[in-house]
Image (cartoon, grey):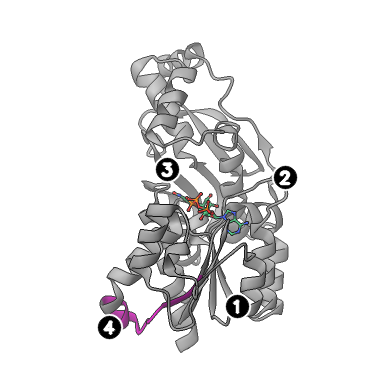
Amino acid sequence: MRIMLVGFGVVSQSFADIIHSQSTKLARDYGLRPRIVAAVDSSGAAIDPSGLDIPMALKSKKESRSLSGLGADVYTEGRSAADVIREVECEVVVEATPSELTHGEPGLTHVRTAMKEGRHVICVNKGPLALAMPALMELAGHNDVIFKFSGTVGGGTPVLDLAKKCLEGCTIGSIRGILNGTCNYILTKMTAEGVEMKEVLAEAQKLGYAEADPTADVGGFDSACKLVITSNYVMGTSMSIRDVDIKGITEVTMEDIASANSRGNALKLVGYVGDGAKVAPEEVPLTHPLNVSGTFNAITFDTDPAGEITLVGKGAGGRETASSVLRDLIEIRKDFAR
Ligand SMILES: NC(=O)c1ccc[n+]([C@@H]2O[C@H](COP(=O)([O-])OP(=O)(O)OC[C@H]3O[C@@H](n4cnc5c(N)ncnc54)[C@H](OP(=O)(O)O)[C@@H]3O)[C@@H](O)[C@H]2O)c1
């Protein structure tokens, strides 16, 4: 199966490494023989229809932050991803450029172009889905391609598939989740150590848990994206991020945290969809399974007749998220076989 990686950062590099190191297992267990025929980053594209040399691509990226180490016959500087998607033959495009939440670009154009060219798409980028998920689902159907996006919610934790596949026959009335590891890390630290938000945020940035510009996380927007994607996929809504009432954690004080604790609760950034859709700091009973600590994510599906079901897992991480890309790829392979 020929694959194109659009964006060759943390997730794509982990994915490339996994399919290279597990090639024997993938062929034996799933009949899957993935071949990365192109990888594109912000400075250019590496293309080889017979399959890129993955160890060399990873080495080149590590040493020079570019794919130029693959050689002039493979790498072209300045080549745009949209052109490469149009020109290079492949079955699957993996979209893994940075999530942009106001216009969704460049990911939105990459996903649309890939679908119009008849390529199946695996997207880990939340932007295009948070802004235009219903239209993208329709475009995928119109072009008869498979559109997968497991990694957009929960990293490697199978949030979407659990709800969609394992809860068949149940009605999901509402969803409540701790969907952003950075915010949860900050609130957990503030609670446990009595440290002010500014200080914890600086530490989280140092540890790589928070971006240099933390607005998407602490402003609640990242949680809202994941809420929209989950709701649309699992509950059949047609929302965009604009339909979510969003309040982040920037105004949370030590007093708010202490006051929640005094009532036997923890203050968490909670995404909720059911009767409306919102993201806001909310008190969660200390004994409730949603009360996860550190960078963990948790999501509770309130179902009928199975009752409340909560899934807990790591919400991010290169290898974890790459595992969800691999799951999506295996699903596409199975669909091929069918
Ligand atoms: N990391 C996680 O744990 C995680 C979890 C879930 C979802 N995600 C989502 O997955 C996506 C990728 O995450 P990541 O951590 O791999 O990000 P990353 O390390 O920042 O990688 C992004 C990649 O996109 C490339 N890029 C930027 N603009 C581009 C353009 N116009 N055309 C082609 N390539 C472009 C970058 O190029 P350069 O290498 O040249 O900078 C880089 O290779 C993001 O949308 C993120 O929100 C990440």
Can residue 264 be seen from the camera position used here?
A: no
Residue 288 in the image: x percent, y percent? 39, 35
Q: Mark 2 = which residue?
A: 243
Q: Which of marks 1 and 4 is nearer the N terminus?
A: 4
What label does residue 41 carry, if any?
Answer: none
SS class, disc 2:
helix
Give the residue type that dot 1 points to: Arg
> Is disc 3 surrounded by few (<14), some (14 to 19) or many (20+) residues within 10 Å?
many
Closer mark to the observer between disc 2 and disc 1: 1
- Which numbered mark, 4 or 3, is in the foreground of this view? 4
User: Which mark sits nearer the N-terminus, 2 or 1?
Assistant: 1
- The answer to whether the residue labelled 3 contacts the one labelled 1, judged by CB atoms less than 8 Å apart, is no
Q: Mark 3 points at which residue?
A: 297
- Name the residue type under label 3: Asn
Of labels 4 and 2, the one closer to you: 4
Look at the numbered discs 2 and 1 and tell me whether their residues touch, using CB distance below 8 Å: no
CA separation, marks 4 and 3? 33 Å
Q: Determine the CA span between mark 2 and mark 1.
A: 30 Å
Mark 4: secondary structure: helix
